[in-house]
Image: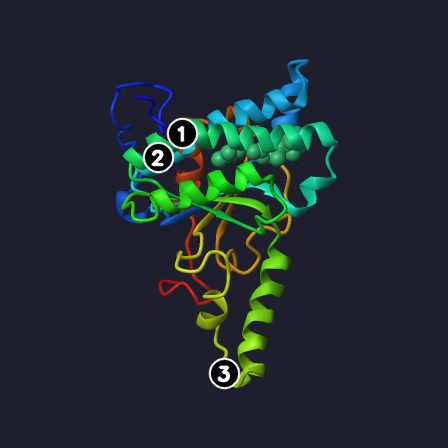
Amino acid sequence: MSRVLATTPALGRTPLPTGLDPARLPRHVAVIMDGNGRWASRRNLPRVMGHREGVEALKRTLRLCSDWGIGSLTAYAFSTENWNRPGEEVSFLMTLFERVLARELQALEQEQVRIRFLGDLSPLPNGLQQLIADATARTAANTGIHFNVCTNYGSRAELVLAAQRLAERAAAGQLAPAEITEELFAAELHTAGEPDPDLLIRTSGERRISNFLLWQLAYAELHITDVLWPDFDEQAMLTALLDYQRRERRFGGVDPLA
Ligand code: FPP
């Protein structure tokens, strides 16, 4: 059996490192997987080899999050702006998504991962759309980690769509504008039902949000690392979580001990 969550077969789960407090783990981790192209260029490889290796890093990260009891992992796989990349790179990515999904679906099912793809999926190739629909349906009742893959995702477009849906309900007389709350708004986002991410990890040293989860990241702690995404491993994840656990989260309030 191929384990989706492991490249190390039959070793079982990776135990939580002793330095981490199990009671203070993030419930939801979001990742901007940056640096695939640079990883490949530094090795004189074509950029797309970086994406292939990036898939391995994503599987590693999903396995660690699952093993360590993190409830949700949301990864930025393809942004609405990524269509502007060279045509060959875009088609490579679409084919890569198809292959990975087809290859890993059985293991995702067995390991209780619930996978969802967030974004406007309509411009994706038909074969990929079908695989996505199948994977979503077959894992919908799974009880393990929630794995969200943001694909053709843009946060501003997501916010506009939410506003349109609420405006339609208001225009139809089903909702008074004053009744729109943060909860109602969040329920119209692709992430409806997920807690907001507590931690955002961005690799390769870039310090940008890049139109990712603008609403949902309102109170997230940010961890920026110079590690390139294909090199993101257990040590890098541990460093991110230790950094997170050192932060004092106030959500706009004050430190009661200060
Ligand atoms: C950016 O690196 C990374 C991407 C465009 C993401 C590629 C997608 C995956 C690795 C995961 C696919 C996942 C599934 C579930 C099928 P970059 O090309 O921007 O790197 P650079 O900044 O060095 O050029």
Asked if the residue at label 1 sits under 8 Å from ligand 1, the reply is: yes
Q: Of the residues shown, which amino acid type is indicated by label 2?
A: Leu
Q: Can you tell me which quadrant of the image ligand 1 is in?
A: top right
Label 2, label 3: how many angstroms apart (C-alpha)? 39 Å
Q: Of the residues shown, which amino acid type is indicated by label 3?
A: Leu
Q: Are marks 1 and 2 in contact (CB under 8 Å)?
A: yes
Q: Of the residues shown, which amino acid type is indicated by label 1?
A: Glu
Label 1, label 2: how many angstroms apart (C-alpha)? 6 Å
Looking at the picture, does residue 246 appear above or below residue 173? Answer: above
The reply to whether residue 38 is visible in this rendering is yes
Q: Please tell me in which quadrant of the rendered image residue 248 appears.
A: bottom left
Label 1, label 3: how many angstroms apart (C-alpha)? 42 Å
Who is closer to the viewer here, 208 or 81?
81
* Residue reaching furthest to the top: 44
Q: Please tell me in which quadrant of the rendered image residue 136 appears.
A: top left
- Disc number placed over residue 84 in the picture, else none: none
Q: Which residue is mark 3?
A: 175
Coloring applied to the structure: rainbow
Q: Earlier in the sequence, mark 2 or mark 3?
A: 2
* Residue drawn at point x = 43 percent, y = 61 percent: 250
Q: Label 3's element?
A: loop
Q: Label 1's element?
A: helix
In the picture, which quadrant includes the N terminus? top left
State how many labels appear: 3
